[in-house]
Image (spheres, rainbow, N blue to C red):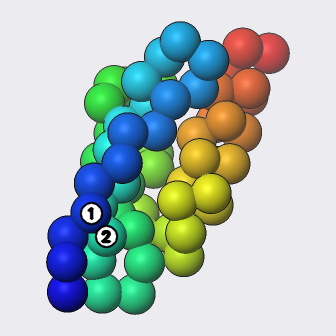
Amino acid sequence: MSHSTHVIEVGNVTAGIVVATEGGFRFFAAGLAFKSLDLAIFPSIADASRAARAKFAKRRH
């Protein structure tokens, strides 16, 4: 399997990176605000991005 890495950003904040792995994309958090997502596996990059945006939106309220 080819390993592909993508940066996940929410606005101008780097949430983390996702790395293609067996079964999806593993999320590696870039900061404490996204720590609860750290090491989670998402089915797609879009799903990881949505989760990061949701986490960031919750944090702002």
Q: Name the residue under label 1.
A: 4
Q: Which residue lies furthest to the right in this view?
A: 61
Query: In which quadrant of the rendered view does residue 32 lie?
Result: top left
Q: Name the residue under label 2.
A: 20
From mark 1 to mark 2, how far is it between C-alphas?
Answer: 5 Å
Q: Mark 1 or 2, which is nearer the eye?
A: 1
Q: Identify the element where label 2 is drawn.
A: strand
The three-letter amino acid code for the residue at tag 1 is Ser
The three-letter amino acid code for the residue at tag 2 is Ala
Q: Identify the element where label 1 is drawn.
A: loop
Q: Earlier in the sequence, mark 1 or mark 2?
A: 1
Answer few, some or many: residues within 10 Å of disc 2's Cα (few below 14, many 20 plus, some between 14 and 19).
Answer: many
**Residue 7 visible within the image:** yes
Looking at the image, do the residues carrying marks 1 and 2 touch, with CB atoms under 8 Å apart? yes
- Seen at 19% across and 78% down, the residue is 2
Query: In which quadrant of the rendered view does residue 7 lie?
Result: top left
Q: Quadrant of the C terminus?
A: top right
